[in-house]
Amino acid sequence: MKTHHEAPTGIAPFPYTLKVSPRAKSVRLKMTPHGGLVVVVPPGFDKKKIVSLLLHHEEWIKKVTAKFDAHRPALPFLSDNGLPATIAFPDFTELWSVVYTQIGIGEVEMVERPGNQLLVSGDVANTALSCKLLCSWLKHRAQVHLLPALEKLALAHDFSYDAAGIRLQHTRWGSCSSRRSITLNSKLLFLPEHLVRYIMVHELCHTVHLNHSRAFWSLVHEHDPSCHRSNLEMKSAWKYVPQWVSAKR
């Protein structure tokens, strides 16, 4: 699949990302919370038709954009480079301040200081490089918090698993393999406690039923009676995740 990032011009009514997909049989528009408008087209599609396509669907695009904005929490305080000045993990009552210092070009490094302060120094004007470093640190914090919480929950509910790990995934909040290996998304650090717990219970139940059968959901409900409500809430859980975590890099 080829991807092109299109900037807004005097003609195009909205900024968008163009994806050419061999599997696409027709043009498709989709909106993502952090990625914005995506136009998926089949190979050979006449790109000159995109402007009229966007104009035709202008009302829908504005409606979905407004819906995302309405559910998005207040923007965190940002530094001059557009990256976070603070990082908070509500479920674990942890708040970090981030200080950026521009030194040199091409490299960045991070140091944790007392009082939950992160010092990021180097080419901090390179937001992609700085963001990548922050996301690596985020994975480390997820290992510190999420894996022990998963183990504690498993012991409390008499579950077992063979391995557990952390990944920064775009769409999946968690997964469980046939080898009973559970993977949790680093982004869970930003979610409320009941949703973090729901995802963990969900994956632990997959160690018993590696499917979404009636028996699986019955087991999930047994260990999390509010699972159906939480499952619905997860459809908009992206709103808790800061934009810098999901930004294209």
Image: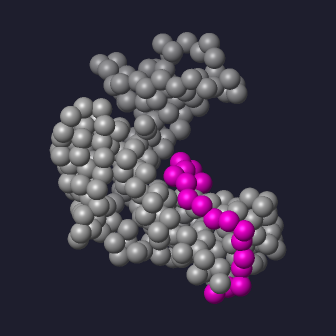
Q: Position of residue 68 (x, y in %)?
A: 41, 51
Residues rendered magenta in the picture: 156-172
Q: Give the tally of numbered discs.
A: 0
Horizontal and vertical percent position of residue 45: 59, 15
Name the residue at the bottom extreme: 156
Above or below, 5 against 247 in this view is above
Q: Is residue 124 above or below residue 226?
A: above
Q: Is residue 181 visible?
A: yes
Residue at (43%, 26%) from the top-left corner?
Answer: 5
84 left or right of 230 in image? left
Q: Is residue 246 part of the magenta span, yes or no?
A: no
Specify the quadrant that holds the C terminus: top left
Of residue 111 and residue 17, the one placed in the foreground of this image is 111
Residue 153 location, quadrant: bottom right
The picture places residue 185, in percent across and down from the top left corner, at: 54, 58
In the image, taking residue 235 as reference, residue 206 lies left or right, namely: right
Q: What is the quadrant of the N terminus in the image? A: top right
Query: Could you tell me which residue is drawn at 78 percent across and 61 percent down?
Result: 179
Q: Main secondary structure of the magenta part?
A: loop
Q: Is residue 170 magenta?
A: yes
At 33% across and 25% down in the image, what residue appears? 8
Determine if residue 206 is in view. no
Q: Nearer the viewer, residue 151 or 11?
A: 151
Q: Which residue sits at x=57%, y=23%?
A: 2
In the depicted view, which residue is nearer to us: 209 or 119? 119
Quadrant for residue 175, please give it. bottom right
The image position of residue 30, as x and y in percent, is 53, 38
Q: Quadrant of residue 207?
A: bottom right
